[in-house]
Amino acid sequence: MIETPRLVLRPWEDRDHAPFAAMGRSPAVMEHLGDLQTDEQVAAAIARLRMFQASHGYAFWAIERRTDGAFLGFCGLKPGTVGPIAGEVEIGWRLREDAWGQGYAREAAEASIAWGWAHLDAPRIMAITTPANTASWGLMIRLGMTRRPDLDFGHPQFQPGDRLYEHITYEIGRP
């Protein structure tokens, strides 16, 4: 568990399914991620994240707001599984729409990166997104990450020509 002034990043719990499923059904939240998600897909995603936590000791953790315990989304680290970040430490985040623009993603991401440097021996932490996801890559820049155009790739989950096919890559090196 990681605590910040406003947030708790923690392992996933059964109570997270419903609010995470609501995020997965939000066209705004899923705009740069893919199709709206079914309950089965949400359950599978949570199971994968729990597996990462159990096998590696870290994952994209659930974000809980400290003042009221509200589930806001996820942020954290996990082993990269696709393209140039396969086998690297990946940082990622996804917040519910009403939590956007309040600095929660940055607060959670900074805490996740600090945790990574303190607990992992990785030389870098990487992130990917679509070129159109300006909010996401804008946060990557604010976190001190550097664009790696030589590592941009076509995401195998999407077909060439799909608006989500092209992905850009960022990294931050160990300080």
Image: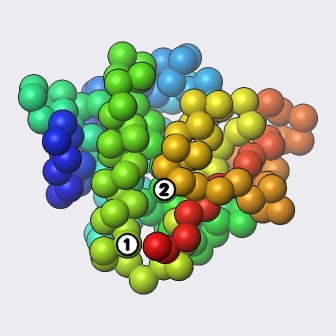
Q: Residues within 10 Å of mark 2 (few under 14, many from 20)?
A: many
x and y percentages locating residue 91 in the rendered image: 48, 56
Q: Residue at x 65, y 32 (%)?
A: 133
x and y percentages locating residue 69 in the rendered image: 12, 31
- Residue assigned mark 1: 117
Q: Quadrant of the image for the N terminus?
A: bottom left
Q: Is residue 51 visible?
A: no
Q: Is residue 98 or residue 124 the one in the foreground?
A: 124
Is label 2 in a helix, a strand or a loop? strand
* Vertical order, 36 against 88 (above or below): above
Q: Is residue 163 left or right of residue 114?
A: right
Q: Residues within 10 Å of mark 1 (few under 14, many from 20)?
A: some
Q: Is residue 123 visible?
A: yes
Q: Is residue 157 left or right of residue 19?
A: right
x and y percentages locating residue 24 in the rendered image: 46, 27
Q: Report the amino acid beneath label 1.
A: Trp
- Residue assigned mark 2: 91
Q: Are marks 1 and 2 in contact (CB under 8 Å)?
A: no
Q: Residue at x 20, y 55 (%)?
A: 2
* Vertical order, 115 against 5 (above or below): below
* Vertical order, 49 against 4 (above or below): below
Q: Is residue 98 or residue 140 the one in the foreground?
A: 140
Q: What's the distance in space between the residues labelled 1 and 2, CA to CA?
A: 12 Å
Q: Is residue 142 or residue 67 the one in the foreground?
A: 142
Is label 1 in a helix, a strand or a loop? helix
Where residue 164 is drawn, which disc sits there? none
Q: Residue at x 37, y 72 (%)?
A: 117
* Residue at the farthest bottom position: 121
